[in-house]
Image (cartoon, rainbow, N blue to C red):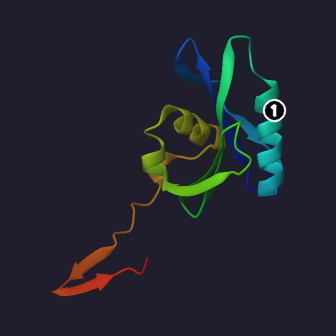
């Protein structure tokens, strides 16, 4: 079972803030998305406006992120390097919740590599 971590962004007094992330236990991505959306929609304090729900999980040394704004029906997904993800405080908190050591992640693979004058390109 791959654990998920969810975090929500709220607008409070004109600023974007987030609450501490939460682990999601479902093994299925769809069920984890539903659980996160239900939890964060019902966990808004007075004066807070839910801006975005973010669900993250680690896969093959990268962070898979699914995002959804309350007024959208569809989730958007993308994959980022863990080192790049920890630059954002809310994603860094989700990485900590998942127990991922960001310093142990492998370096990103280059798209073009030159060895002894031969150029190798990765198909993207």
Q: Quadrant of residue 42?
A: top right
Image position of 124 (left or right of 119): right
Give the image location of residue 13, x and y in percent: 56, 11
Q: Which residue is mark 1?
A: 39
| Residue that appears at 64% across and 38% down | 97
Quadrant of the image containing the N terminus: bottom right
Give the image location of residue 122, x and y in percent: 38, 79
Residue in the foreground of this view, choosing between 122 and 76: 76
| Residue that appears at 81% across and 57% down | 28
Give the image location of residue 47, x and y in percent: 68, 11
Numbered circles on residues, count: 1
| Residue that appears at 63% across and 53% down | 76
Q: Quadrant of residue 50?
A: top right
Sort mark 1 into few (<14), some (14-19) or many (20+) by Cα contacts within 10 Å: some
Quadrant of the image containing the C terminus: bottom left
Image position of 93 (left or right of 117): right
Image position of 23 (left or right of 91): right
Q: Is residue 110 above or below residue 13?
A: below
Residue extending farthest left: 117
Where disc 1 sits, the SS reads helix
Residue in the foreground of this view, choosing between 118 and 32: 32
Give the image location of residue 99, x and y in percent: 62, 43
């Amino acid at each position: 079972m791959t654990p998920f971590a969810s975090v929500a962004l709220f607008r409070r007094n004109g600023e974007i803030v987030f609450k501490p992330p939460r682990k999601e236990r479902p093994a299925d991505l769809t069920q984890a998305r539903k659980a996160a959306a239900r939890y964060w929609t019902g966990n808004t304090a007075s004066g807070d406006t839910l801006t975005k729900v973010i669900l993250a999980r680690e896969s093959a040394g990268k962070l898979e992120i699914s995002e959804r704004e309350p007024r959208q029906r569809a989730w958007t997904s993308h994959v980022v390097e863990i080192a790049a993800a920890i630059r954002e405080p809310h994603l860094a908190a989700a990485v900590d919740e998942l127990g991922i050591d960001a310093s142990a992640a492998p370096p990103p693979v280059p798209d073009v590599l030159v060895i002894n004058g031969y150029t190798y390109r990765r198909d993207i």
